[in-house]
Image (tube, rainbow, N blue to C red):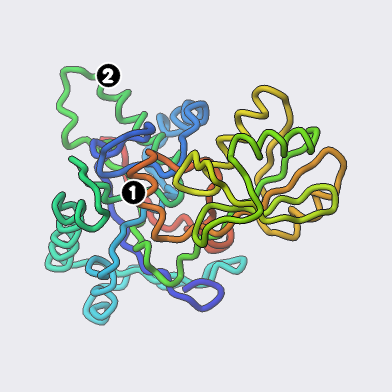
Amino acid sequence: MLNDGKVRAGIVGAVDLEQYDYRKGSKSQVRATEATVVERIPPRVRIREGAPIELPHIMILIDDDMKTVIEPLAQKTSGMTKLYDTPLMQKGGSIKGWLLGEDDKNAVLSALDKLADIDAFNKKYGMNEQNALVYAMGDGNHSLATAKEFYERLKRTNPDKDMSHHPARYALVEIVNLHSPALEFEAIHRIVTEVDGDKLLSFLTERLALSESGSIGGQSFVVLHGGSEKKMYVNNELSKLSVGSLQTALDEYVKANGGKVDYIHGEEVVKELANKANSVGFILPDMQKSELFPTVICDGALPRKTFSMGHAWDKRYYIEARKITE
């Protein structure tokens, strides 16, 4: 139970790293939702190399709008073995965990297999894909990428060894339904500093064909500069999301002209920072849950810092551990 009283239900289990590829454009069942910064992986691998167990912070989302995987288990906990039941510190709420029996595990796996059915998948999203996206990273992508790289290195250094059942082939994760009422997406806004604001906005106006009017449901964001606040509509979309179009254009501008982009939680903070000299603020609309899977399928990954899922104290605590050495 979260600090606000909402309950986030999840299933803790081991995901097969053979089914995960964090590279943009991946068609694996488990995919990154944001670009992976490969420079972050080697230091984490060095830690994992000397660790007998993992205590990860990894949340993976499934798009189970019919609530067939996790939700049915809530009615069965009275017949399960309770593993833990404890309050969490610093506004973390509380956590309870139960052990799934064989019948429940088989039911979960069967329901997940149905989400992976390619015909049902393509019908659901109006796509014509060859491989289904079943598991989309919600939190801890670099932790999972580290587990993947560690496993791949083991395979390379042990070419004659059968690694099919090695514990490092798997990583411990929490599976959460995208449609959980306790899971809320919040926009991460942008502030650009050390720039000529008028020049930046002129570039964006041309690159994105910005205008002060647009279609309902079209891409848009609010621009804060020089004490003014204007909602602008994107008529030349560079991504399926407003944040993607803006981020692509900002990256192009900063690369050519300099400047610094920071990522901000909370509209009031953006408004305050945008009042400073040589600064421009951008308030982005909240991303809808329904946009996550279609965008990852079509674009390969979301722009960095697209959304956050709740407050820091709502994140996973380090409760479960798993052996990763033989």
Q: In the image, what residue occupies the spot 46% across and 36% down?
A: 35
Helix, strand, or loop for circle 1?
A: strand
Within 10 angstroms of label 2, few (less than 14), some, or many (20 or more) residues?
few
Give the image location of residue 120, x and y in percent: 16, 56
Query: Which three-letter amino acid code belongs to the residue tagged 2?
Result: Arg
Within 10 angstroms of label 1, few (less than 14), some, or many (20 or more) residues?
many
Q: Quadrant of residue 50?
A: top left
Q: Is residue 125 left or right of residue 89?
A: left
Give the image location of residue 167, x and y in percent: 25, 39
Please give the residue where the numbered disc 1 appears in the rendered image: 172
Give the image location of residue 38, x and y in percent: 47, 28
- Of residue 56 and residue 208, the one placed in the foreground of this image is 208
Please give the residue where the numbered disc 2 appears in the rendered image: 156
Q: In the image, what residue occupies the spot 61% across and 31% down?
A: 251
Location of residue 132 with respect to 124 vertically, above or below = above
Q: Quadrant of the C terminus?
A: top left
- Of residue 114 and residue 214, the one placed in the foreground of this image is 214
